Amino acid sequence: MEPDLSLEGKVVIVTGAAGAVGGEIARTFAAHGATLVVVDSLEAEGAETAKELGGGTLFLACDVGDPDAVCSMVEAAAEKHGRLDILVNASAVGLAIPDEPPGAASYPDEFFSRAVAIAVNGSFYCAKYAAQRMMARGAGCIVTVVKGEGAADLGGGVGQATGAAGAIRLTEAMALDLGLRGLRVNAITAGGRATPVDIAHAALFLASEMAARVNGATLAVGA
């Protein structure tokens, strides 16, 4: 049988699900049969996303920059459904940045710290604890979505560029390690012309059996 885009029977965590991109990814995955656990630090908006999706979708409030909170979130998701197949890190793509990001010499410390904490630290924490559950079954898929195109893209200022570049390198490093354990780890960079639907379709491809032999790749969408 030819591989397809079905996610029937797969348990999926989507972080940043209250945002436009994370929400669209959750809707797309649900439409392809996935059982969803949607995650965000914005409780009201995240709960609304879960309500919209229906079908037993679970919402868990979590700040992905907090490793203890991430560990508890992943455990709750896996315990609820008895397994975890796919993680989509989409928190960084919805991160607020200054409307007109200043130059490096005047870039706000708080924006820089938050951008790196979510895109790099948060992606690592989520992938780490999700991988622990996935390795027990010898299979799993992790997809991380970031804004821009890494260090070469300063559209969101140095904070966003640093966070995106770090997340891409993290993806490559984890792919090398976890690939030996049956897991796949890939990334998506969302360029200025990418719509939430474009990004959701790219994430669906990477999470599906159609990308069963894709590991350590970064897909540039809307570059």
Image (cartoon, helix red, strand yellow):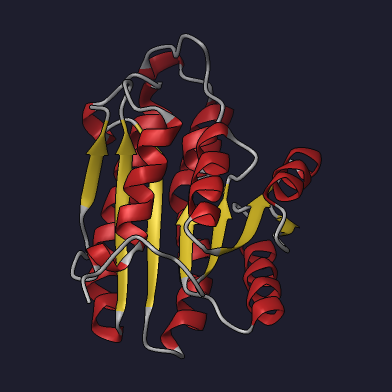
Would you say residue 35 is visible in this rendering? yes
For the image shown, how many numbered marks are present on the structure?
0
As drawn, the residue found furthest toward the front would be: 1
Q: Is residue 117 visible?
A: no
Q: Position of residue 212 (x, y in %)?
A: 24, 70
> Toward the viewer: 153 or 34?
34
- State which quarter of the image contains the C terminus: top left
Q: Answer with left or right where residue 76 lies relative to residue 105.
A: right
In the current view of this chain or complex, which residue is farthest to the right? 44
Indicate left or right for 207 with 116 as reference: left
Task: Give the answer, above or below, for where 7 lies relative to 182.
Answer: above
Q: Position of residue 181 (x, y in %)?
A: 30, 85
Q: Please provide percent x and percent y for residue 135.
A: 42, 85
Quadrant in the rendering for residue 69: bottom right
Is 59 left or right of 179, judged from the image as shown?
A: right
Locate residue 29 relative to residue 60 in the image: left or right.
left
Of 72 and 52, the residue lying toward us: 52
Identity of the residue drawn at 53% across and 73% down? 129
Q: Is residue 147 above or below residue 204?
A: above
Residue pictured at 50% horizontal, 37% vertical: 21
- From what the image shows, is residue 174 above or below residue 196? below
Q: Position of residue 206 (x, y in %)?
A: 31, 57
Quadrant in which the N terminus appears: bottom left
Q: Is residue 211 above or below residue 190?
A: below
In front of the other: 22 or 165: 22
Residue at the (68%, 66%) spot, across then down: 73
